Image (spheres, rainbow, N blue to C red):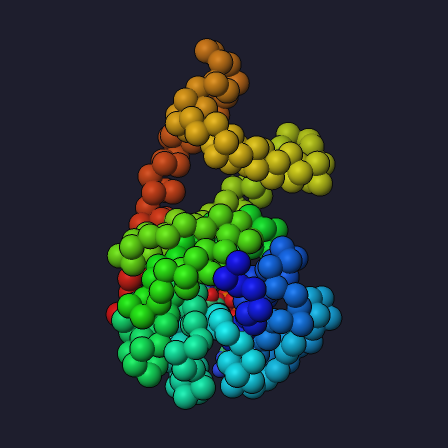
């Protein structure tokens, strides 16, 4: 396997960096001793060292020097500055992976020395529980093997597909941001049951399991979601009453528009 013997580095150990590091180590793809992480925020490094046993440092150059594959997990707004601090330590023997929303491959490549191998990935926070949905796209100097490595790394914490770069904003609006659309749905569905008298803990378990079960059915039966909905909706039954309310509140339009607006923001971040 092409990842064998390679060391993995993370610059930025905030919400997404930490989720990926823990998920990837849990999956056993890299041993913690082969993972290097740096950040300016020492408490997050301490926490990572404690929980995942990876090597940590406040020096990004140390991460780069020790690693074959370096994941840039800092905010899009500071990506350029971070690259400026590491570019001289990145030769053609290293692969750079950016998970920054919106920032285009050409703009990332321009900040590095010529020939730098770059891959762009949009993961999501469900890497925490090995259920991320990620898409990768290949830079102009990255090889097929680099893409395979990225698919293996992100595939170890969920599912990962390859898309053309012009679809990365759509992916960001859908699966990158998507968990944040579903958490309020779970909370609100539980609220409805609490209103009807169910205790909060049971309501949250049932709401979350309902979302998980529906998602699993959509993935595993490969049946159109409309048809799956019809399987639940008895004539003159309970479900159709609920569906009518959701339609009255414009649920489909709201979710569509959320994905479109988030994609638009990703496009803005890339300008
Ligand atoms: N959160 C998510 O669900 C997803 C995020 N992403 C992308 O992942 C990236 C990180 O997002 P997220 O984890 O949410 O953000 P966070 O702010 O949680 O994490 C970024 C981390 O980078 C640190 N940092 C800042 N400057 C430097 C530096 N010079 N060198 C090293 N580390 C530095 C920050 O420290 P400090 O706080 O001290 O500034 C922080 O700990 C973004 O580009 C985002 O677009 C992609 C998909 C999903
Ligand atoms: O909100 C954001 O900008 C990041 C990118 C995708 C998910 N979170």
In the rendered image, which quarter contains the C terminus? bottom left
On screen, residue 46 above or below 251: below
Query: Does residue 100 appear to the left or right of 211 in the view shown?
Result: left
Residue 159: x %, y % from top left: 49, 48
Q: Position of residue 129 (x, y in %)?
A: 61, 51
Image coords of residue 114 (percent x, y)? 30, 81
- Residues 227 and 108: in front is 108
Residue found at the far front of this picture: 1
Is residue 139 rendered to the left or right of residue 38? left
Instruction: Identify which residue is drawn at 36% across, 64% down.
Output: 143
Q: Is residue 91 above or below residue 47?
A: below
Residue placed most toward the observer, 27 or 123: 27
Q: Residue furthest top?
A: 235
Is residue 139 in view? Answer: yes
Q: Quadrant of residue 138?
A: bottom left
Measuring from the top left, give residue 191's x and y in whole percent: 60, 39
Please name whichever residue, 267 or 118, is drawn nearer the observer in this view of the structure: 118
The image shows a total of numbered marks equal to 0
| Left or right: residue 205 compared with residue 138 | right
Q: Residue at x 57, y 37 (%)?
A: 212
Residue shown at 71%/66% (left/top)?
51
In the image, what residue occupies the spot 43% across and 82% down?
90
Location of residue 166 with respect to 99 vertically, above or below? above
Work out whether residue 12 can be spotted: no
């Amino acid at each position: 396997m092409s990842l064998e013997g390679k060391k993995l580095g993370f610059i930025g150990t905030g919400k997404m960096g930490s989720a990926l590091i823990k998920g990837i180590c849990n999956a056993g793809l890299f041993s913690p001793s082969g993972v290097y992480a740096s950040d300016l925020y020492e408490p997050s490094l301490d926490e990572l060292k404690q929980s995942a046993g990876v090597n940590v440092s406040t020096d990004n150059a140390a991460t780069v020097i020790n690693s074959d594959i370096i994941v840039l997990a800092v905010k899009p707004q500071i990506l350029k500055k971070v690259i400026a601090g590491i570019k001289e330590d990145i030769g053609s023997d290293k692969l750079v992976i950016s998970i920054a929303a919106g920032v285009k491959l050409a703009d990332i490549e321009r900040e590095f020395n010529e020939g730098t191998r770059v891959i762009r990935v949009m993961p999501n926070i469900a890497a925490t529980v090995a259920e991320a949905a990620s898409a990768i796209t290949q830079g102009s100097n990255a090889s097929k093997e680099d893409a395979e490595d990225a698919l293996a790394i992100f595939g170890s914490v969920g599912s990962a597909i390859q898309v053309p770069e012009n679809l990365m904003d759509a992916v960001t609006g859908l699966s990158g941001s998507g968990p944040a659309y579903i958490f309020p749905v779970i909370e609100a569905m539980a609220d409805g049951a609490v209103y009807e008298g169910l205790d909060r803990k049971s309501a949250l378990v049932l709401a979350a399991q309902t979302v998980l079960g529906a998602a699993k059915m959509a993935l595993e039966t490969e049946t159109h979601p409309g048809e799956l909905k019809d399987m639940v909706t008895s004539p003159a039954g309970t479900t159709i009453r609920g569906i009518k309310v959701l339609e009255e509140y414009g649920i489909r339009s709201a979710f569509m528009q959320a994905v479109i607006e988030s994609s638009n923001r990703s496009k803005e971040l890339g300008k």
